[in-house]
Amino acid sequence: MTTLTLVRGDITRQRADAIVNAANSSLLGGGGVDGAIHRRGGPAILQECRKLRASHYGRGLPTGQAVATTAGALEARWVIHTVGPVYRVATADPSLLASCYRACLRVADELGARTVAFPAISTGAYGWPMDDAARIAVQEVRATVTAVEEVRFVLFDDAAYTAFAERIG
Ligand code: AR6
């Protein structure tokens, strides 16, 4: 059974088997969570990302998919990179955001990870409304069959924490 837990904090400070990066399809870094992970984790992460681009993702990692690298200097064994959808009112597709959570848990199972820390994917630069993102995240994790024992949502501010807390109940 998977336990869902919540903490307010910085995902780069988490001790977990795997932490999830809200990346972009280039896998070459960016701002927000992505920037923080690469900064704190060091160059080993980017090095593996470049190799993955060369071997598998020349056209970029598609939205909703996930792939793992080393966690470099972070207190985790792996970083699982996923690409959330950009929120646009008329065309926002919740199934793509749900797919990020499912795909990360599938990769975690392949790795043998038992604890996985997630940020609130797509809710920063990609603009997804927090309440809706929390609903999708909690619903999808609960619906996914996985050997992961703890899914920890790591929320950066009070508003995000409250949104997730209301969904978890
Ligand atoms: N720990 C936990 N949560 C954080 C942290 C942190 N250190 N930093 C920010 N957040 P974002 P996205 C929260 O923008 O919306 C990047 O440039 C933040 O408050 O990191 O999926 C990528 O390269 C927000 O609630 O990810 C992509 O181009 C949430 O994490 C793009 O941004 C996600 O914000 C991805 O955008």
Image: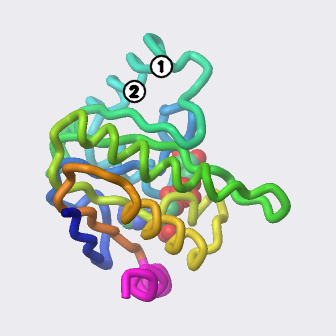
Q: Is residue 25 a member of the stretch shown in magenta? A: no
Please report the residue visible at 47 percent of the width from the left and 79 percent of the height from the top: 160
Q: Judge the density around disc 1: few (<14), some (14-19), many (≥20) Cα neighbours within 10 Å.
A: some
- In the image, 148 versus 66, the foreground residue is 148
Residue tagged 1: 53
What are the residue bounds of the magenta stretch?
157-169
Residue 88 is situated, as x and y percent measured from the top left of the image, at 78, 59
Left or right, residue 92 beside residue 109: right
The answer to whether the residues at label 1 and label 2 have Cβ atoms under 8 Å apart is yes
Residue 16 is situated, as x and y percent measured from the top left of the image, at 17, 55
Please report the residue visible at 41 percent of the width from the left and 41 percent of the height from the top: 81
Residue tagged 2: 49
Label 1 – label 2 distance at C-alpha = 6 Å
Q: Secondary structure at mark 1?
A: helix
Residue 36 is situated, as x and y percent measured from the top left of the image, at 38, 53
- In the image, 114 versus 73, the foreground residue is 114
Q: Quadrant of the C terminus?
A: bottom left
Task: Please name the predominant secondary structure of the magenta segment in the image.
Answer: helix
- In the image, 48 versus 64, the foreground residue is 64
Look at the picture and state if 24 lies above or below 28. below
Please report the residue visible at 21 percent of the width from the left and 37 percent of the height from the top: 72
Q: Judge the density around disc 2: few (<14), some (14-19), many (≥20) Cα neighbours within 10 Å.
A: many
Left or right, residue 146 beside residue 161: left
Q: Which amino acid is tagged 1?
A: Arg
The disc label shown at residue 122, or none: none
| Residue 59: quadrant of the picture | top right
The colour mode here is rainbow
Q: Quadrant of the N terminus?
A: bottom left
Q: Which amino acid is tagged 2?
A: Cys
Number of numbered callouts drawn: 2
Q: Secondary structure at mark 2?
A: helix
